Image (cartoon, rainbow, N blue to C red):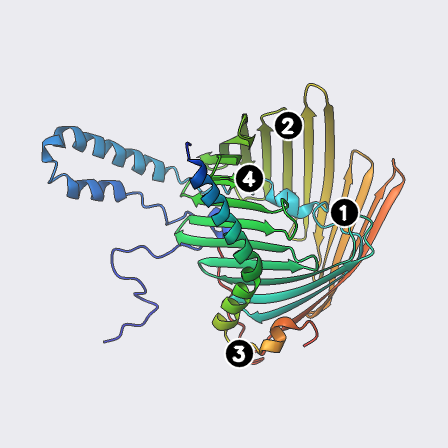
Amino acid sequence: MAFSEDTKERLVRVVDVTKTVLHYGWVPFVLYIGFTRSTPQPSFIKLISPLA
Amino acid sequence: MAAPPATTPYPLGTQPPPPSGPELLGSAQNPSFPSSSSSSSSSSSSSRVSFLDPILLPLNSAIQRLQETRSKLGLTNPGTVEGLQKEVKSVHATNFVFDGARADLTKALSINPIFQVTHAFSMGSQAAPSSYNFGAVYGDSNSFYQAGLDDGMNVTMRVNRQFFPGHTSKVQAQLASTQGQSFVQLEHDYQGSDHSANLKALNPSPADGTGIYIVNYLQSLTRNFALGVETIYQRPSVDMEEASTGYMAKLFGEKRDWVATAQFQGQGIAQATYWQKLSDQVEVAADLQVLAMAQKREAQATLGARYAFRMATLRAQIDSTGKISSVYETRLSPAFGLNFSGEIDHLQGAAKFGFGVSIESGGEMDPNAPPPAPPSVPM
């Protein structure tokens, strides 16, 4: 594949940004999906505390 | 007039989604494979390209006859290449052995869709430092999400999504806080009526094409024999390329009470396994691995058994390097379980032992209502 240096640099940057977003956003995303779609909806404290 | 939803859940002409769990796919003929679609699609287009009829029609009927003969053979899905040794792995203690102390707290917050969070603590292991791990799992009938976060701020991620019946796309990633430790795997899995195919890309880089790419295909040839092929293409850096092809065969009993597999991978690695269900409670499995490379020749055999008691599971295993290991998992009450693990290496005089507790708590559910059936999650 022949990409120009510019495109390559942009690709690398896009991958880096995606990685960062997923790194900080993935756990909250799964918790949000589960929290909103669960039946019955659990209480928030149950979601994160090991003791509750 | 509203029809009862159970009788006509899908409009005429569309296919209901098949059971998507891997165990269901293997057991019955999968209705997802539209065996007659080729005839219907080309007959509608033949009006536009009717001058090609002398060529297309015989071709069409030949394809149709081929499909009919194929469906008459009654072949079943052979399972995936990745799950070739699934039975053996579930019997052997190798994947269940741990050392040190462990505590797992699981909270099942919802059954359908599946949603649970886990807190896992481990300490005192010889190999790894003490750690804490938080996990969340969400699953419904066409998607599966898993998230993990450990005390070093490393995130693990798994996504399985079923776009069409039989087609599952998977992403698996490890996002490390330190540079260069991250890992991603993109995968697409296809399970047809009598074959399955899988495409995998490990750490693919769109910029320079490096990464590891794996493609495999497994086809049932008779009702209890399947043959497969797998090609691995590795490109660790721009100017280094390597490819190898391996083959595998799977033989199973009429009632699926025994499975024998043989696998030969490129670079001189061969593996043969045998699994048998002796009774409802007892399963045994044997595994032989041979490494025959130019500079290294090695072989290892493993023999293991699994006993399933009413509230406990015992795995015992011995291998040819003189290692004995055993894992005992018991459930004292539905919410409280104890795990014991031990491994003794007689030749090296090494041993490791583990003790674990697992506590499970449910969400607020009506104790009188029957528990909802869990969805079949695409795995």
Query: Residue B144: x percent and y percent?
Result: 50, 58
**Numbered-mark total:** 4
- Whether residue B297 is visible here, answered yes or no, is yes
Alpha carbon distance from label 3 to label 4 = 40 Å
Density class for disc 1 (Cα within 10 Å; few <14, some 14-19, many ≥20) is: many
Q: Quadrant of residue B123?
A: bottom right
Q: Give, as a three-letter code, the residue at label 4.
A: Gly
Q: Are marks 1 and 2 on the same chain?
A: yes
Which labelled disc corresponds to residue B221?
none
Identify the secondary structure beneath mark 2: strand
Crowd class of label 3 (few under 14; some 14 to 19; many from 20; radius 10 Å): few
Tag 4 secondary structure? loop
Q: Chain of mark 3?
A: B
- In the rendered image, residues at marks 3 and 4 fall on the same chain: yes
Q: Which residue is mark 2?
A: B269
Residue A13 x, y percent position in the rendering: 49, 47
The residue to which callout 1 is attached is B316
Q: Quadrant of residue B183?
A: top right
Q: Which residue is mark 3?
A: B369
What residue sits right under mark 4 in the picture? B253
Residue B301: % across, % down: 73, 33
- The correct choice, above or below, for B254 with respect to B129 in the image is above
Q: Chain of mark 2?
A: B
Badge 4: chain ID: B
Q: Quadrant of residue B221?
A: top left
